[in-house]
Image: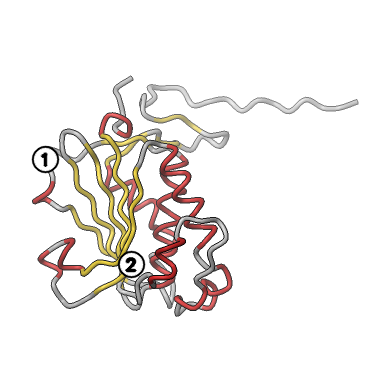
Amino acid sequence: MSRRKKRRKRPKGRRDPASQQDVDGEEILHSAAIDLVLKDAAAPFAKGPEAPAIMYETLSAASEGPAPVIERKPEILFGLRNLIENASAFALTKVLIASAWTQNDVKIIVLDDGPGFSTEILAWLGEPYLSARNRSRNTVARKGGLGLGFFIAKTLLERTGGKVMFGNRRWRDVDASLDDGSVGAWVSVVWPRKVIEATEQ
């Protein structure tokens, strides 16, 4: 005879409409301020002996009004996490995660100070079978390359309404205050604000 498991009682009290609780009673956020979403996405790569310094910047000159609260969709988190993982693996010392917003759109930029994308890689970046093992200084990253991970990230982010662009940029071209001569691989994701901003429930 099979035993029926007792159902765990949910805690009583008011619940934030932007969250729910998992089976252990832990809060799961459906939305959060953009800076918190970015820090959540970068958290796995911010620690460790080989971890680069991760810098967060709000591009205030390109932003309008208060920071948006955005939907914390799995596709957005996993997509950004893949981009940040790639940047962290190829960075020499640091990774920049920048955000900007207007009344019409929301932009997130991931930039590293590594060797950048080669011309050959740029021609095929976003395809599922590209390998860029030689670009990385990190042994683990060399084993995985960036092709499939970048393809998955691009697919997930585009599925949420984002437009993904990539290339090589000088850090000062992203933020003039970061003019230390650094150049690296640059990825930008731009969403129409109405498709990513959380709506009140």
Give the residue at mark 1: 64
Q: What's under tag 1, amino acid-wise?
A: Glu
In the displayed structure image, the side of residue 151 where residue 104 appears, left or right: left
Give the residue at mark 2: 185
Q: Is residue 139 above or below residue 85?
A: below
**Nearer the viewer's eye, disc 1 or disc 2?**
2
Residue 50 in which image quadrant? bottom left
| Circle 1 residues within 10 Å: few <14, some 14–19, many ≥20 | some
Residue 118 in which image quadrant? bottom left
The answer to which of marks 1 and 2 sits earlier in the sequence is 1
Q: Is residue 103 above or below residue 184?
A: above
The local secondary structure at tag 2 comes to strand
Q: What's under tag 2, amino acid-wise?
A: Ala
Where is residue 199 drawn, in percent x and y? 30, 25
Name the quarter where the C terminus is drawn: top left
Where is residue 171 drawn, in percent x and y? 20, 68
The circle on residue 28 is none
The local secondary structure at tag 1 comes to loop
In the displayed structure image, the side of residue 112 where residue 63 appears, left or right: left
- Labelled pair 1, 2 in contact (Cβ < 8 Å): no
Q: Is residue 137 above or below residue 167?
A: below
In the displayed structure image, the side of residue 76 where residue 10 appears, left or right: right
- Residue at horizontal 53 percent and vertical 64 percent from the top: 130
Where is residue 72 drawn, in percent x and y? 39, 38
Q: Is residue 92 above or below residue 64?
A: below
Name the quarter where the N terminus is drawn: top right
- Residue at horizontal 20 percent and vertical 57 percent from the top: 57
Work out whether residue 117 or residue 110 is closer to the camera in this orientation and state it.
117
| Circle 2 residues within 10 Å: few <14, some 14–19, many ≥20 | many
Where is residue 78 drawn, in percent x and y? 47, 48
